[in-house]
Amino acid sequence: MAGSAYVHVVDGRLRVKVPDLKGAPAVACVMESGLRALPGVESVTASAVTGSVVVVHDPEVTEPAEILAAIRALAGLSDPAARDPTPAAPFPMGGMLAASLARVAFEAALQHAVRVFFLPVCY
């Protein structure tokens, strides 16, 4: 499997693009279950549609590097990120923030619809 192409970190939230996750709902289920077992992880969304894994975690308990290592192990990746992720700069207020929130809401709604209608249930 190839490594991930994208890592984005904001305090307590990690998004990793894992191209090999696309079209692999069974891998997404395994990824979600495995990452939920980590201490400090509050929620996980692994999308076989977008090839993205989003992890909300307590940064006081679990570091992003630990989550990346778990993603590597669960997906059989050699290196999901060549470097440890650095926190992103805060969004400026205004149009960029509104556009970002709209995009996140749309993506969440789309992922939910796809999960409900097309993908197997993960436990």
Image: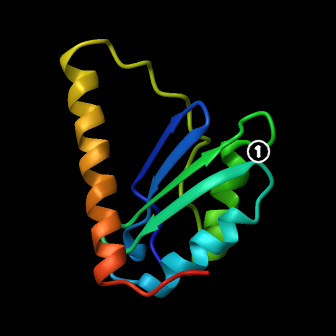
Query: Between 17 and 29, which is closer to the camera in this rendering?
Result: 29
Q: Quadrant of residue 21?
A: bottom left
Image position, residue 48 (x, y; %): 37, 74
Where residue 75 appears, as percent x and y from the top left, is: 57, 75
Q: Is residue 100 above or below residue 107?
A: above
Is residue 104 among the parts visible in the rendering? Answer: yes
Name the kind of residue labelled 1 in the image: Thr
Q: Does 123 sit left or right of 90 as displayed?
A: right
Q: Total label count?
A: 1
Residue 7: image location, x then y, percent: 47, 47
Q: Could you say whether the residue bearing mark 1 is in a helix, strand or loop?
A: loop
Q: Quadrant of residue 91?
A: top left
On the image, numbered disc 1 is attached to which residue? 62
- Name which residue lies at 30% across and 45% down: 105
Residue neighbourhood size for the residue with mark 1, other residues' Cα within 10 Å, grouped as few (<14), some (14–19), many (≥20): some
Q: Residue at x 71, y 39 (%)?
A: 58
Q: Position of residue 82 (x, y in %)?
A: 55, 50
Residue at 28 percent across and 69 percent down: it is: 113
